[in-house]
Amino acid sequence: MIFNLVATVILIAFPFADITTHESNDVLSIGTIHDKANDSKDTLSIPDLQDPYVLKGFFDLDNDGESEEVTISSTLGKEIGDENTKIYINNSEKSALVLHGYFDGIEVRKINSQGLQILEVRTASGHSIDTTFYTYEKRQLNLMPVSTSKPPSFYGIVSRNKPEFKDIDNDGTLELLAYYRYFPPEKQRTVEVYKFDGLGFIKTQEYEETLDNTYF
Amino acid sequence: MELIYSDHTERVVKKSENLVFTVKNKGIYLIQVWAKTKNEIQMEGTDDEDLRIEIDNRKFSQLTNNARYFDSPAAFSGGTSKGLTKTVFFLLWLESAEHHFSLIPDLSATFIGVDISQVTQESTIREFSFPLNITAEDGDRRDWITFVFVDASLASLKTELTLTRRFLDSDDVKIVIDNSIKRSNQNKRQKFWYFITSLVKGEQQSEKFEANLPSGVHYVEFWADRMPKLEKITFENIYFKIPTTIQEKIEYKSQQFGFDPKMMLRIAKRESQFDPEAESGAGAKGIFQLTGITIKQIKELGFEVSNPYDVDQNIEGGFLYFSWLYKRYDGQRDHVKKTLAAWNWGLGHIPVKEPLDFNNLPEETKKFINDVLGDNDF
């Protein structure tokens, strides 16, 4: 049944963004928005970052059969370092979420067979990507803490690499995989595996893996 | 010499001014600056006027204290020049690009003018001789002329001066090379003044001084009492070390910005292993892994990185951004660590006033800081 729950996503004002829906054995991503400006390796051009950067999409955040209108507003701010991203739901005047950093991507995923959906938000900050996870209940976004995340004021993953979701133990629930692919020229990266415990993600494994190619 | 920029609009400078000039042909350039600064008595207050110069963000400090700029020989200090005109010459290598010449006053100063001329397109000068004909304004002992050699070595210099006997007090000249006062054997009583009119025979004085200064920043100072005239100066064997490799360019920029070269090299190595073509999965590009947002922010700082894979642009942009972060945390405890944490994780996460809670930084940020400040090989 969950494979029928592909969200409707509508682009309103989204000059550099791409919206996709896709399915695979491990991941069911029901709605994805990511910043396409960073995708191309061949171009020398510098993306002309929109400021403010506003976009809207429709996601069924709480799996009740009705899509929520999600508005993302990202700005570089008045001064360097002011960049922040705000998320509004269903045209609310009050933002549901305010994050440091410029918008990098947003995805909605179903992570278990009970149909729990989570919202993943990524912002670029410094040389890192901050990733945080939320559930949407009773018209509120609720932060899902990641057990080893630090500092206390930040409950997500900070890495130069995007995290992934995979059902690595085939129990029907997706695990969160965070990659700390450290820095060049290393081929080795640290993988942290987090399992969903009903509220957030608890780290269950950490291991090093060697890749065929280097960081770049 | 070919004059490429000139500004002779005399004015009182109370705020920093940035003058922009374009160098079409790289080479050795001479920047001549005139200004006046008054002392606290002349200001009828408790503070002197001061003015210092920055060239492409490069500061010129005292040789013995790299945190003191306004009383450096390259600056104009009211306490020593006492409201009289001082001339500072900068001899330096400039690449073909847009350059910035900044006037930074403390309180205020009277800027008289600046001339920028190309001396040669070579990096070595066997003999650089030019007539000056600068006569000091009448006044008591004060600093008068400084020659600043920027990243150059110098073998020797020859001065041609005119000193005049005057009623009660005649002309005298003191010469200081890198804080070392040149002493004359003729003069036991006033040993710090090399040329004393009452002791020398004739008005024209010519003398050669061996300097043997290695590559670096050097100051040759002339102090005046009354109204001596510097007719001509000749410098021999000036050699500029031009950075060519990425590592040399980072070291050169580190000196320009006043940062520890080892730290800046380790940042670049950690970010890209000095690979100018490096690009991360998140879209960070080049030696300092500049992101689209960072490049936009660098543009706000006055420099446009149009091609982040270009070595010089990336290094300049990386230094400007790091320097901006560094100034943001200036005066704070863990100044350098805060700067590096903000570089890695974003300054929105690193408040200026709050203490840095290092243990609670993200693991990747801690590793970055430890790698940059440590000695481990990577």
Image: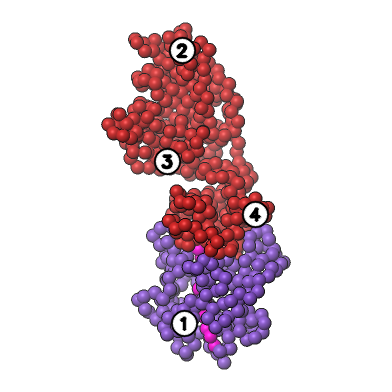
Chain colours: A purple, B red
Label 1, label 4: how far apart the Cα atoms are: 43 Å
Mark 3 or 2, nearer chain start: 3
In magenta stretch: residue B160: no
Quadrant including the C terminus of chain A: bottom right
Q: Chain of mark 4?
A: B
**Closer to the N terminus: mark 4 or mark 3?**
3
Q: Are marks 2 and 4 in contact (CB under 8 Å)?
A: no
Query: Which amino acid type is marked by label 1?
Result: Tyr
Which mark, residue B102?
3
Cα distance between the residues tagged 3 and 2: 41 Å
Magenta-drawn segment: A115-125
Q: Which element is circle 2 on?
A: loop
Q: Residue at x 55, y 52 (%)?
A: B314
Q: Amino acid at mark 2?
A: Arg
Is disc 3 surrounded by few (<14), some (14 to 19) or many (20+) residues within 10 Å? Answer: some
Q: Residue B273 bears which disc, if any?
A: 4
Q: Which residue is mark 2?
A: B189
Dot 1 corresponds to which residue? A136
